[in-house]
C-alpha cells in the first residue's frame, strides 16, 4: 500500500502563487509517474502536471509556462509551484502516483485532495 501525503494549497489572489507538495509513503516500489490533477465543482478531474520517470515533466496546456513540477528533497516527493494563478483554477487538487512494485505489478494511488482557492 502506498499513502500519498499532500501539503500546501490554500488561498491566493489572482496572479499570486501557491506551492503544493506530495510525498509517497511506503516501501518496495518505484514510481513510474507522479503528479497532480484538479477537479473544480461540476467539472471532470483533469491533469495539471506530472513528472514521468523522475525527470520528465509534462504539463497540461493550461499550466505550461506558469506551473513548475519538480522532484522534492527525496525521490518520492513532487512539488508543484503554481504562479500567475487564475480564479478559474479554484479547485480541489489531487496528487496521484503510478507505481510499480518489486514483483512487477503496478497500481495507481490518489491523495485525499487539497483545496486551492484563487480570489479575483
Image (spheres, rainbow, N blue to C red):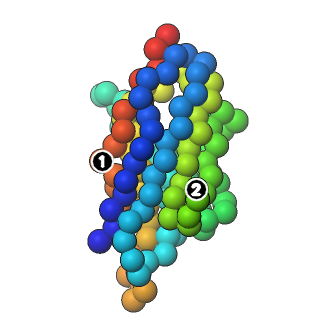
Q: Is residue 76 visible?
A: yes
Q: Is residue 32 above or below residue 94?
A: below
> Residue extending furthest bottom?
103
Q: Secondary structure at mark 1?
A: loop
Q: Nearer the viewer, residue 117 or 50?
A: 117
x, y (%) of residue 87?
48, 18
Q: Is residue 105 above or below residue 95?
A: below
x, y (%) of residue 36?
47, 47
Question: Which residue is located at x 45 percent, y 52 percent?
Answer: 22
Question: In the picture, residue 61 is in which quadrant?
Answer: top right
Q: Secondary structure at mark 2?
A: loop
The CA distance from mark 1 to mark 2 is: 19 Å
Decide: few, some or many residues near mark 2? Use Cα within 10 Å; few <14, some 14-19, many ≥20.
some
x, y (%) of residue 50?
55, 53
Q: Quadrant of the N terminus?
A: bottom left
> Residue extending furthest right?
65
Report the disc number at residue 112.
1
Q: Nearer the viewer, residue 86 or 28?
A: 28
Question: Which residue is located at x 62 percent, y 24 percent?
Answer: 84
Residue placed under numbered mark 2 in the picture: 72
Question: Which residue is located at x 39 percent, y 77 percent?
Answer: 27
x, y (%) of residue 52?
59, 62
Query: In the image, is 66 to the left or to the right of 33?
Result: right
Amino acid at each position: 500500500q502506498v499513502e500519498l501525503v499532500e501539503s500546501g494549497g490554500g488561498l491566493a489572489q489572482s496572479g499570486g502563487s501557491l506551492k503544493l507538495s506530495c510525498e509517497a509513503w511506503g516501501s518496495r516500489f518505484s514510481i513510474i509517474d507522479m503528479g497532480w490533477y484538479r477537479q473544480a465543482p461540476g467539472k471532470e478531474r483533469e491533469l495539471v502536471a506530472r513528472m514521468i520517470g523522475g525527470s520528465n515533466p509534462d504539463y497540461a496546456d493550461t499550466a505550461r509556462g506558469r506551473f513548475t513540477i519538480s522532484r522534492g528533497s527525496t525521490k518520492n516527493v513532487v512539488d508543484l509551484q503554481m504562479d500567475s494563478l487564475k480564479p478559474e483554477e479554484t479547485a480541489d487538487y489531487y496528487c496521484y502516483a503510478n507505481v510499480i512494485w518489486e514483483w512487477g505489478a503496478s497500481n495507481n494511488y490518489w491523495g485525499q485532495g487539497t483545496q486551492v482557492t484563487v480570489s479575483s
